Amino acid sequence: MNRFITILLLSVLTQLMIAQDDRSKHDKIEQLKAQKVAFLTEKIGLSSADAQIFWPVYNQYAEKKDSLGEARWRERNQLKEDFDQLSAVEKEKSIDKQIQLKWEEEKMEYDYHKKFKKILSIDQVIKLYDAEHEFKMRLIRQIREIKAEHSGDKGHNRTS
């Protein structure tokens, strides 16, 4: 009976840790989105009136872009994983689908570019694209720094 209770408790604790980790990831994503909103708003120079019109459109754009990018990423990874088992026809379909998704993403970006120009001045549109790039580069730099710190920590522990 004690063994059953121990297993049950471990199972419940594991589920709680997984749920907490998922929640933690969700919280980090939400925090990152909030940082991006603040960063872009400042860089673009949005008034509160412009922001009320711009952010719903931008959020739609970002959601669609993420969805298409994720679909393309999944397709690419699936092709990599199954490469040796797929026929030439299946490989062709996979790569065609990736190109189609990329084209849909480009078309969607162009459509939203036209919407952005109706909401923002051309200077603000340019600042938007520059700010998006700058934010992305900052994230990449932060990720590299974190990885370097973790690599350094591991190396430090081995020499101690």
Image (tube, rainbow, N blue to C red):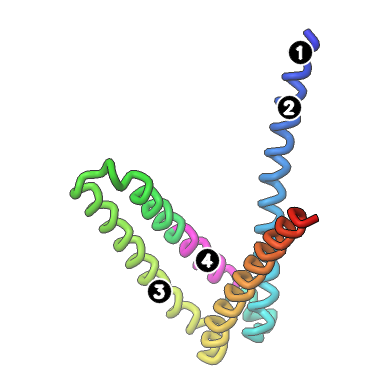
Which sits in the foreground, 55 or 102? Answer: 102
Which amino acid does the dot numbered 3 rest on?
A: Asp
Asked which quadrant contains residue 8, the reply is: top right
Which amino acid does the dot numbered 2 rest on?
A: Val
Q: Residues within 10 Å of mark 3 (few under 14, many from 20)?
A: few
Disc sitting over residue 62 in the figure: 4
- State the residue position of label 2: 12
Q: Are marks 1 and 2 in contact (CB under 8 Å)?
A: no
Q: Are marks 1 and 4 in contact (CB under 8 Å)?
A: no
- How far is disc 1 from disc 2 in space, using C-alphas? 14 Å
Asked if residue 57 is among those painted magenta in the image, a careful observer would answer: yes
- State the residue position of label 1: 3
Region of the chain picked out in magenta, as a range: 55-67
Q: Is most of the magenta stretch helix, strand or loop? A: helix
Which amino acid does the dot numbered 4 rest on?
A: Ala
Q: Are marks 4 and 3 in contact (CB under 8 Å)?
A: no
Tell me which label, 4 or 3, sits earlier in the chain: 4
Please state the horizontal and vertical placement of residue 65, each as a whole percent of the image: 47, 64
- State the residue position of label 3: 111
Which sits in the foreground, 113 or 5? Answer: 5
In the rendered image, the residue lying farthest to the bottom is 123
Q: Is residue 118 above or below residue 61?
A: below
- How far is disc 3 from disc 2 in space, using C-alphas? 48 Å
Asked which quadrant contains residue 45, the reply is: bottom right
Tell me which label, 1 or 4, sits earlier in the chain: 1
